[in-house]
């Protein structure tokens, strides 16, 4: 029983690696307050998906999918998931670049890349607005 | 009869122009985006963008006309039949969504020409138009394609360009709103990608029709169960279904108003279409609703969204933020329609998709007018605007009444359809909840009307409307909310035909 389970895990080690990376990436993206780290977490998350697709394209004993004429016994790996991942990599690069560009702009505007500090700055601004508003209202009430 | 004969002839000729409309629908804005980049001059780029969006509208109307009788248009790229090539596949449902997206794009881009000048540094406007056209490309592509991986690619094209558009907002908070949306949006899209991967693993195809056929045989496997959850959660993030909605209020309230008008009226609608397409078309109602019970999860979440969104909207101090929270509630109505898992329910969801796009587009354009006049959209600033901008504020009232669901407006038609769909299943309590949440909409719309018409304005009253290029598009959308309330034949007929076709399944309709 335990042997079965162990061999099951050992033969699916690539999927285990993929799920581990997935969880690490998602955890970083959610838990870290540093915006650059968030982007890196998403990067790891996306990389794990690439591993998932490449794993499913692998055929046991398969070779690179270049047709060999006169050798019908040769088994080939499935090239389609690899091609899909080329596109996914491009998408990943684009979103990482855009995310980092936004972080640069955020750093220029707030002078920090820590989420909690940015939230605190925004809140302080809100409170100032609110205080100004209630002062105004109080002044109006006084006149009325 | 003559129609069928002529389409047959076109297919034989092979090169007829009308035959390539599905490809042009996406290619026009896709090629337009880099061209805009090259045009540089603001006036030319904006005219070009508006021209392309109107061409897209004409194409989508033609496609809807062709599919209305139940015919399905299949366009094979490069003449490669499935499963080798990518095909575009248009039935009534996505033709309807194509019309909604391109209609809103045409009207909003026409209104946006003046707005862009205020939000963006001088000399950089062409970048705004490029991003807007790319976003349109992505949204149309997601809707039209019949290939699941293509869906992911187009979804990311539209998402990445919408992050750029949101980050153009005037305040620095817009950057943070765009960043949060980017994080949540990317996680959502990657979830969808994982789901698609698992589906491919079990079926060996990416074509929607082939996949739907083969999924039936493997629908018992754990892989497909996991795929359903990844796909549903991934799309729900994009759709802003209740607990996954956190990105929406900030994104829509910090973006330039013209961008909010475009995204609020299109992005969530396309995500809703995707949810319908994957759950009914690919996985099938039997798997998603009867076996997994997604409806049992979606229904309470939709009801929560209706109430939480509306209650949050009541307490907002900013007009755009109020509209954003109201959007969360309105998404709740749409997903509630799907969660009823009946033809009438899905039809109600689709009717609301159409109507809500018009109402929210109109209301965010009103916000654009207010921004033009006052510089911001704080509700406190809108005191007495009813006298200062009577035409704009009349549009606010018209679209606002539609949002509440007053008879004679489009909102009434969709709520009526939703309530009847609920009653059809003897869900009396649910029908009661739908009406209850409409009362909350009365509260937040009334708050606006009170400030606009009955509050003492500060300073002298100077009557000055927004410029016509902003006012006319606003009234086109606001007028349509009334038009489709009085003459609901078109929207109801299309949505019912679409729902009927959806329940036949992808293969059944072919």
Image: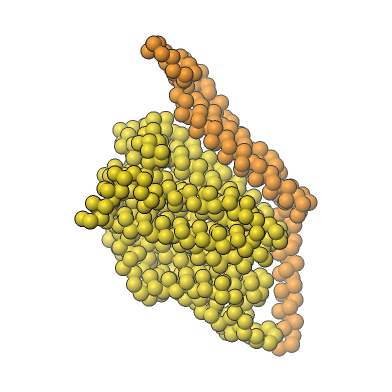
Q: Is residue B219 left or right of residue A56?
A: left
Q: How many marks?
A: 0
**Can residue B407 be seen at all in this image of the molecule?**
no
State the hue of chain A.
Answer: orange
Query: Residue at (26%, 48%) from the top-left corner?
Result: B8
Q: Nearer the viewer, residue B32 or B191?
A: B32
Q: The N terminus of chain B lies in which quarter of the figure?
A: bottom left
**Can residue B79 be seen at all in this image of the molecule?**
yes
Q: Residue furthest right?
A: A111
Q: Residue furthest left?
A: B1
Q: Is residue B192 left or right of residue B169?
A: left
Residue B266, placed above or below residue B185: below
Q: The C terminus of chain B lies in which quarter of the figure?
A: top left
Picture quadrant where residue B407 is located? bottom left
Q: Is residue B327 left or right of residue B370?
A: left
Residue B118, placed above or below residue B475: above
Query: Residue at (41%, 40%) from the top-left corner?
Result: B77
Residue B356, placed above or below residue B79: below
| Relative image position of residue B5 (x, y in whole percent) | 23, 51
Query: Residue at (54%, 45%) from the top-left corner?
Result: B156
Q: Is residue B408 left or right of residue A118?
A: left
Picture quadrant where residue B383 is located? bottom right
| Relative image position of residue B240 (x, y in whole percent) | 51, 53
| Relative image position of residue B209 (x, y in whole percent) | 34, 40
The type of colouring in the image is by chain
The chain drawn yellow is chain what? B
Residue A25, placed above or below residue B400: above
């Amino acid at each position: 029983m335990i042997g079965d389970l162990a061999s099951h895990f050992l033969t699916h080690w690539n999927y285990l690696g993929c799920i581990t990376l997935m969880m690490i990436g998602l955890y970083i993206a959610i838990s870290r307050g540093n915006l650059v780290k968030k982007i890196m977490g998403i990067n790891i998350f996306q990389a794990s998906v690439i591993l998932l697709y490449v794993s499913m394209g692998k055929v046991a004993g398969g070779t690179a999918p270049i047709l060999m004429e006169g050798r019908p016994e040769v088994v080939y790996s499935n090239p389609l998931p690899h091609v899909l991942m080329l596109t996914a990599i491009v998408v990943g690069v684009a979103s990482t670049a855009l995310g980092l560009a936004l972080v640069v702009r955020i750093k220029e505007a707030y002078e920090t890349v820590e989420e909690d500090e940015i939230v605190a700055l925004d809140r302080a601004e809100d409170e100032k607005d609110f205080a100004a508003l209630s002062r105004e209202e109080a002044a109006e009430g006084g006149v009325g | 009869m003559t129609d069928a004969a002529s389409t047959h002839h076109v297919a034989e000729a092979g090169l007829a122009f009308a035959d390539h409309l599905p490809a042009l629908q996406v290619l026009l804005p896709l090629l337009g985006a880099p061209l805009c980049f090259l045009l540089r001059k603001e006036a030319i780029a904006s005219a070009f963008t508006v021209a392309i969006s109107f061409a897209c509208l004409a194409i989508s109307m033609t496609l809807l006309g062709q599919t209305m009788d139940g015919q399905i248009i299949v366009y094979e790229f490069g003449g490669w039949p499935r499963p080798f090539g990518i095909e575009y596949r248009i039935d009534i449902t996505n033709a309807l969504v194509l019309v909604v997206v391109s209609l809103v794009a045409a009207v909003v881009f026409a209104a946006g020409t003046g707005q862009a000048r205020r939000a963006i540094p001088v000399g950089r406007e062409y970048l705004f138009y490029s991003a807007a056209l790319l976003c349109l490309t992505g949204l149309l592509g997601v809707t039209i394609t019949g290939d699941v991986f293509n869906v992911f690619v187009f979804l990311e094209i539209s998402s990445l360009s919408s992050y750029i558009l949101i980050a153009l907002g005037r305040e620095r908070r817009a950057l943070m709103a765009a960043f949060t949306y980017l994080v949540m949006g990317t996680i959502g899209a990657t979830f969808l990608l994982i789901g698609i991967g698992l589906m491919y693993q079990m079926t060996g195809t990416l074509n929607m029709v082939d996949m739907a056929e083969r999924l039936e045989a493997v629908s018992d496997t754990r892989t497909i169960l996991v795929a359903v959850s990844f796909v549903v959660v991934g799309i729900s993030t994009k759709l802003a279904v209740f607990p996954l909605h956190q990105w929406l209020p900030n994104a829509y309230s910090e973006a330039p108003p013209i961008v909010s008008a475009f995204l609020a009226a299109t992005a969530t609608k396309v995500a809703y279409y995707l949810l319908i397409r994957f759950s009914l078309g690919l996985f099938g109602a039997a798997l998603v609703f009867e076996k997994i019970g997604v409806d049992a999860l979606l229904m309470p979440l939709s009801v929560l969204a209706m109430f939480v969104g509306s209650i949050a909207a009541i307490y907002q101090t900013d007009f755009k933020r109020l509209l954003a929270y109201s959007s969360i509630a309105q998404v709740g109505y749409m997903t509630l329609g799907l969660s009823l898992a009946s033809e009438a329910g899905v039809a109600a969801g689709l009717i609301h998709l159409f109507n809500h796009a018009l109402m929210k587009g109109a209301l965010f354009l009103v916000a654009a007018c207010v921004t033009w006049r006052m510089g911001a959209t704080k509700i406190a600033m809108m005191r007495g605007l009813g006298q200062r901008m009577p035409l704009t504020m009349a549009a606010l009232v018209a679209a606002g009444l539609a949002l509440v669901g007053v008879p004679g407006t489009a909102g009434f038609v969709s709520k009526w359809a939703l309530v009847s769909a609920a009653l059809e299943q003897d869900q009396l309590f649910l029908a009661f909840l739908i009406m209850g949440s409409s009362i909350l909409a009365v509260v937040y719309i009334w708050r606006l009307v009170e400030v606009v018409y009955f509050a003492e304005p500060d300073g002298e009253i100077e009557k000055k409307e927004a410029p016509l290029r902003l006012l006319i598009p606003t009234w086109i959308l606001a007028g349509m909310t009334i038009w489709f309330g009085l003459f609901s034949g078109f929207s109801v007929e299309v949505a019912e035909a679409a729902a009927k076709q959806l329940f036949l399944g992808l293969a059944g309709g072919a």
